[in-house]
Image (cartoon, rainbow, N blue to C red):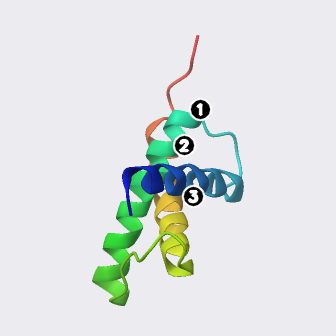
């Protein structure tokens, strides 16, 4: 998968993760893309380590499920890390 594929996968997986988790998460579209890319990498790592299944091509359902699952984990960590900070 090329860099454009990672960006698109990150944007969509991050947006889906933000839609699944309740609450108001901070960050715009750039944070959503980064969250999704890091989530896809984390999901691929955990999938290969635990389930012996890694990321495949862009159009495979397991790639999307692992990316969204990893994005949910990263979003939870992001929420805990930014919970105390307020914009003024």
Residue under the image location 53 percent in, 52 percent down: 8
Left or right of 81 in this view: 32: right
Q: Is residue 1 left or right of residue 61?
A: left
Which residue in the protein does label 3 denote?
A: 13
Regarding mark 1 in the picture, which secondary structure is present there? loop
Tally the numbered discs: 3
- Residue 63 in picture, x, y percent from top left: 48, 74
Task: Between residue 50 and residue 16, name the one nearer to us.
Answer: 16
Q: Which residue is mark 1?
A: 28
Quick one: label 3, few (<14), some, or many (20+) residues within 10 Å? many
* First in residue order: circle 1 vs circle 3: 3
Q: The C terminus is located in which quarter?
A: top right
With respect to residue 60, does 42 lie above or below? above
Q: Give the answer, above or below, for where 56 lies relative to 72.
A: below
User: Answer yes or no: do the residues labelled 2 and 1 have beta carbons within 8 Å?
Assistant: yes
Rendered view: 6 above or below 80: below
| Residue sitting nearer the eye, 15 or 5 | 5
Q: Secondary structure at mark 3?
A: helix
Q: CA distance from mark 2 to mark 3?
A: 8 Å
User: In whole angstroms, how far apart are the C-alphas of marks 2 and 1?
Assistant: 6 Å
Residue in the picture at 43% in, 62% down: 40
Residue 76 or 61: which is nearer the viewer? Answer: 61
Position of residue 37 measured from the top left corner of the image (x, y, whole percent): 43, 53
> Where does label 2 land, which residue?
32
Among the 4 quarters of the image, the one containing residue 20: bottom right
Identified at 55% across, 65% down, the residue is 68
Image quadrant containing the N terminus: bottom left
């Amino acid at each position: 998968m090329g860099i454009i594929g990672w960006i698109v996968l990150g944007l969509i997986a991050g947006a889906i993760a933000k839609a699944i988790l309740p609450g108001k998460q901070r960050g715009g579209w750039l944070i959503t893309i980064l969250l999704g890319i890091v989530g896809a990498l984390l999901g691929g790592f955990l999938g290969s380590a635990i389930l012996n299944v890694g990321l495949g091509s862009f159009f495979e359902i397991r790639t999307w499920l692992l990316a969204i699952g990893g994005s949910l984990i990263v979003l939870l960590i992001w929420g805990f890390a930014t919970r105390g900070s307020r914009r003024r």
